[in-house]
Amino acid sequence: MKKGFHSQLNSRGYRLTQQRQAILNELRQADHHLTAREIYTAVRRYLPQISLGTVYRNLDVLEQLVLIKKFEHRGLFRYDADIQDHYHLFCQYCDRIEDIPKSQLGDLESHFNWETDFQISHYQLDFHGSCVACQKNRADQERA
């Protein structure tokens, strides 16, 4: 994947810098959807000279090249290295975010293209609810 990343950058006039590689590595290794500040804190452990501004600029480049996705949740932008089509499930209590593969809901685009005269270029579909841990905590609180 590094070679693909390198060639995508080069074809658009960007270089594969140590900072870009570190940011993308953090996003790919993360177990949740990171904010720019979380990425900055993680990368700074091994690139102490990196600035928050550099992180933001590189995130913008990576998003423009469609190497990552950016979405907003509760006023914060979060970044996702999974660029495959998928949806997000948001816990309304603890802010946990899970990915839901697009295949689990079928082909919504084809359905709407067929049912309407719209040609859909893009869409965002999010689900909000309560994760298992929060359901348990709320049930425990109600019993107490």
Image: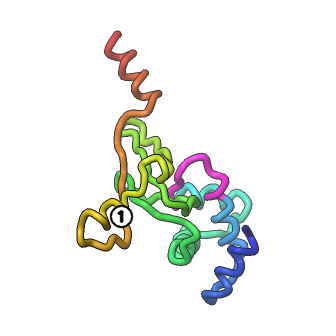
- Judge whether 72 appears above or below 121 on screen: above
Mark 1: amino acid? Tyr
**What is the count of numbered marks?**
1
Question: What SS does tag 1 mark?
Answer: loop
- On the image, the x and y values in percent for residue 29 come to 67, 53
Residue 76: image quadrant is bottom left
Q: Residue at x 37, y 18 (%)?
A: 139
28 within the magenta span: yes
- In this view, the residue in front, 69 or 60, is 69
Q: Residue at x 73, y 60 (%)?
A: 46
- On the image, the x and y values in percent for residue 50 come to 64, 69
Residue holding disc 1: 123
4 within the magenta span: no
Q: Residue at x 68, y 83 (%)?
A: 15
Q: Residue at x 33, y 60 (%)?
A: 111
Would you say 39 lies left or right of 35 here? right
Q: Which residues are magenta?
A: 26-36
Farthest residue in the top direction?
144
Would you say 16 lies left or right of 71 here? right
